[in-house]
């Protein structure tokens, strides 16, 4: 048997883009903390500005096929930000309706192959109190008590030989279905789906006082030993990454 021709290299996964939330610049921030809860697959950021405590929770739901971000404070009317999309791909921003920002484009060329996968990302802010405004390629939230941000993505990829799918329809389907749900339901469905797999395995190698330190400090001091729980944490972090894939 003789092989004829040169096989094409595997084409890369490509980022669609970024959604940036621009908050008013505070004079000072205190109590800044960020964490990833492996048991719920939820990231959390919290901090205090001028006596107001801000919290953000974020997760990507395999159940509802959306990114979900929840912004809250302990005082009403304190959440304001401007959200914008940007992308390294050939793309444009539009506003398909009064409360949704869209990023549409096509994948980039790679390994001599012209980009052919079309995509659309949609971002919507559901505010409690305050105002939401869309215009000039920006989504603006002003004076809200709490905000749930939803991001959905659709592509034209059907299979390796067919990229004729309807990206906007796919993105819209995911966004509308998720928008009809309360944040608490989205969160609960995500946790239940994650834990269905994550709870299959536990690992206990023992715990010492080192477990009370922040993770970055534990990593730096690990060479000195006496932190078997950090090994178990890395083991579970690897499982979390595989489940996230």
Image (tube, rainbow, N blue to C red):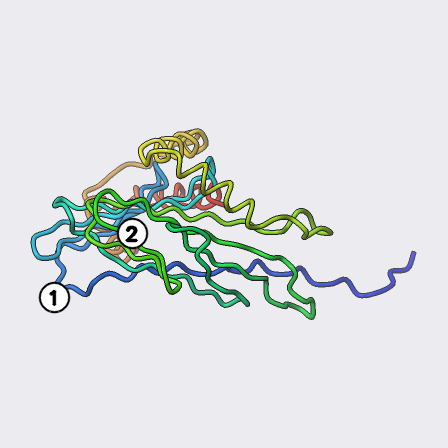
Q: Residue at x 69, y 70 (%)?
A: 112
Which of disc 2 and disc 1 is earlier in sequence?
1
Q: Secondary structure at mark 1?
A: loop
Residue 181 location (% of width, % of height): 38, 33
Quadrant location of the N terminus in the rendered image: bottom right
Residue 132's disc is 2
Q: Which residue matches tag 1?
A: 27
Disc 1: CA contacts within 10 A as few (<14), some (14-19) or many (>=20): few
Q: Is residue 90 left or right of residue 188?
A: right
Q: Residue at x 61, y 48 (%)?
A: 166
Q: Is residue 123 left or right of residue 76?
A: right
Q: Residue at x 24, y 42 (%)?
A: 128
Q: Residue furthest front?
A: 98
Residue 166's disc is none
Residue 138 location (% of width, % of height): 36, 61
Tell which of 213 and 140 is nearer to you. Answer: 140
What's the distance in space between the residues labelled 1 and 2, CA to CA? 25 Å
């Amino acid at each position: 048997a003789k092989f004829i021709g040169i096989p094409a290299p595997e084409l890369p996964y490509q980022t669609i883009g970024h959604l940036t939330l621009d908050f008013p610049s505070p004079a000072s921030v205190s109590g800044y903390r960020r964490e990833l809860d492996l048991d719920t697959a939820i990231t959390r950021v919290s901090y205090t500005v001028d006596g107001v405590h801000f919290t953000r929770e974020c997760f990507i739901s395999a159940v509802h096929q959306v990114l979900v971000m929840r912004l809250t404070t302990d005082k009403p009317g304190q959440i304001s930000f401007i959200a914008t999309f940007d992308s390294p791909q050939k793309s444009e921003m539009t506003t398909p309706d009064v409360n949704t920002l869209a990023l549409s484009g096509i994948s980039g060329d790679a390994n001599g192959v012209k980009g052919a996968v079309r995509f659309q990302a949609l971002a919507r802010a559901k505010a409690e109190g305050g105002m939401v405004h869309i215009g000039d390629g920006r989504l603006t939230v002003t004076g809200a008590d709490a905000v749930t941000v939803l991001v959905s993505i659709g592509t034209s990829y059907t299979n390796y030989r067919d990229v004729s799918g309807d990206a906007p329809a796919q993105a819209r389907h995911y966004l509308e279905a998720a928008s009809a749900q309360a944040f608490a339901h989205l969160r609960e469905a995500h946790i239940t789906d994650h834990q269905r797999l994550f709870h299959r395995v536990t690992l206990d190698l023992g715990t010492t006082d080192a477990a009370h330190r922040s993770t970055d400090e534990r990593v730096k001091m690990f060479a000195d030993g006496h932190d078997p729980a950090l090994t178990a944490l890395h083991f579970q972090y690897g499982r979390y990454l595989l489940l996230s894939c």
